[in-house]
Amino acid sequence: MSVSPSLVNQPLLLQAVAFASQKHRTQRRKDDVTPYINHPLHVALLLSDVAGVTDSGILAAAVLHDTVEDTDATVGEVAAHFGERIAKLVFEVTDDDTMHYRERKQYEIDHAPQLSDDATLIKVADRTSNVMDLVEAPAVGWDVQRRQQYLRWAEMVVNNCRPVNGALATNFAEVAERVRQQLGMGS
Ligand code: ZN
């Protein structure tokens, strides 16, 4: 299914959900069980629920945030369906896959302060969701060390983000602390 013309008259957020669920339709999360779409929906829900975001453009970008990185969707395609603002936001939180893994992970830490306010919101909610998954839906083949390493990296990314939303930052710190305990890392 491509996004059918009838979707054009639907609310923006519903169009984003339809587009993302179609693009991610064959994918599962790293636990090999959870449908991929649960993650971008979780990121959007965190923004609405925890951060109090009501801007449907930001919520739509959150739903779409992994489509360019992890599916055949392109920034141009997202722009054509959802406009430049949302496409730019998705692009801002898309990893550059021409970089090697370690380089990309370091870049994400270093680049965090340069993100726009809206992209920062998505980045922090994205990291919150992934950190929760470390204990709630752990990746197949990730031992405790690997999960601890991911948590430390995610904390470095979020700590380097500009303070755009206090509630979201506090929530991340609480989630990280809980996961830290569950992974046996102490405080
Ligand atoms: Zn994500």
Image: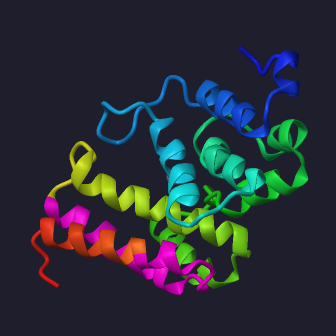
Q: Quadrant of the C terminus?
A: bottom left
Taking the spot 54% from the left edge, 24% from the top edge, the residue there is 25
Relative side of 130 to 167, left or right: left
Q: Is residue 157 visible?
A: no
Please state the horizontal and vertical placement of residue 1, each as a whole percent of the image: 71, 14
Q: In the rendered view, would you say 120 is above or below 95? A: below
Taking the spot 52% from the left edge, 69% from the top edge, the residue there is 124
Q: In the rendered view, would you say 126 is above or below 67? A: below
Q: Nearer the viewer, residue 116 or 104?
A: 116
Relative side of 51 to 152, left or right: right
Please state the horizontal and vertical placement of residue 166, each as a whole percent of the image: 53, 81
- Is residue 145 highlighted in magenta? yes
- Is residue 92 highlighted in magenta? no
Please state the horizontal and vertical placement of residue 17, each as a whole percent of the image: 65, 33
Q: Nearer the viewer, residue 103 or 30?
A: 30
Residue span colored magenta: 144-170
Q: Is residue 107 visible?
A: yes
- Classified by dominant secondary structure, the portion drawn in magenta counts as helix
Taking the spot 56% from the left edge, 67% from the top edge, the residue there is 51
